[in-house]
Image (cartoon, rainbow, N blue to C red):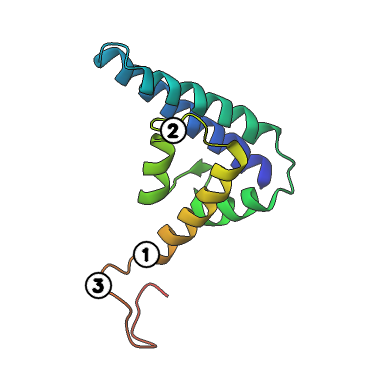
């Protein structure tokens, strides 16, 4: 399973990097987009190099995989798209730690936009 998350997450990160490079073209070679794209490529390489037993990957696999695809929630996806856009010094491991926090929050909000329901009355549980 962890090998699946590594490849799926890498595919997602590289696709997001390609999107950032496309944004750079649209916005006159905006250095922030190019920096974000390079950072996402670096993060993808880092994810591939992590050991299969990495706890963060196991958690992300449980929270953000749909079949064979990495499908992060809203907050997780948003932050991935902004990786190193504003701050070039964001660390790879610190960002992965943050992704786990965001994926946990995304999962907690899934289907609960109206708030918590009384016990036994929640169709999503």
**Nearer to me, 66 or 21:** 21
Q: CA distance from mark 2 to mark 1?
A: 27 Å
Q: Position of residue 80 (x, y in %)?
A: 44, 39
**How many numbered discs?**
3
Mark number displayed over residue 89: none
Name the quarter where the C terminus is drawn.
bottom left
Picture quadrant where residue 59 is located: bottom right
Q: CA distance from mark 1 to mark 3?
A: 10 Å
Residue 83 in percent (x, y) is at 44, 35
Of callouts 2 and 3, which one flags the residue occurring earlier in the amino acid sequence? 2
The residue carrying mark 1 is 109
Q: Residue at x 38, y 72 (%)?
A: 124
Circle 2: is it few (<14), some (14-19), or many (20+) Cα within 10 Å?
A: few
Q: Position of residue 49 (x, y in %)?
A: 70, 32
Q: Residue at x 42, y 47 (%)?
A: 76
Q: Which residue is mark 2?
A: 87
Residue underneath mark 3: 114
Instruction: Name the element at disc 2.
Output: loop
Residue 50 location, quadrant = top right
124 sits to left or right of 5: left
- Nearer the viewer's eye, disc 2 or disc 1? 2
Q: Are marks 1 and 3 in contact (CB under 8 Å)?
A: no
Disc nearest the viewer among 2 and 3: 2
What percent of the width, then of the height, locates residue 110? 37, 63
């Amino acid at each position: 399973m962890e090998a699946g998350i590594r490849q799926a997450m890498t595919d997602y990160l590289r696709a997001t990097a390609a999107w950032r490079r496309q944004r750079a073209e649209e916005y006159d070679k905006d250095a922030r987009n190019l920096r974000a794209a390079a950072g996402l490529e670096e993060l993808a390489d880092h994810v591939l190099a992590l050991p299969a037993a990495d706890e963060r990957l196991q958690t992300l696999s449980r929270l953000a995989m749909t079949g064979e695809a990495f499908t992060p929630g809203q907050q997780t996806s948003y932050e991935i798209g902004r990786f190193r856009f504003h701050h070039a010094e964001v660390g790879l491991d610190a960002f992965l730690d943050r992704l786990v926090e965001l994926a946990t929050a995304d999962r907690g909000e899934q289907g609960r936009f109206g708030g918590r329901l009384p016990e036994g009355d929640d169709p999503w549980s």
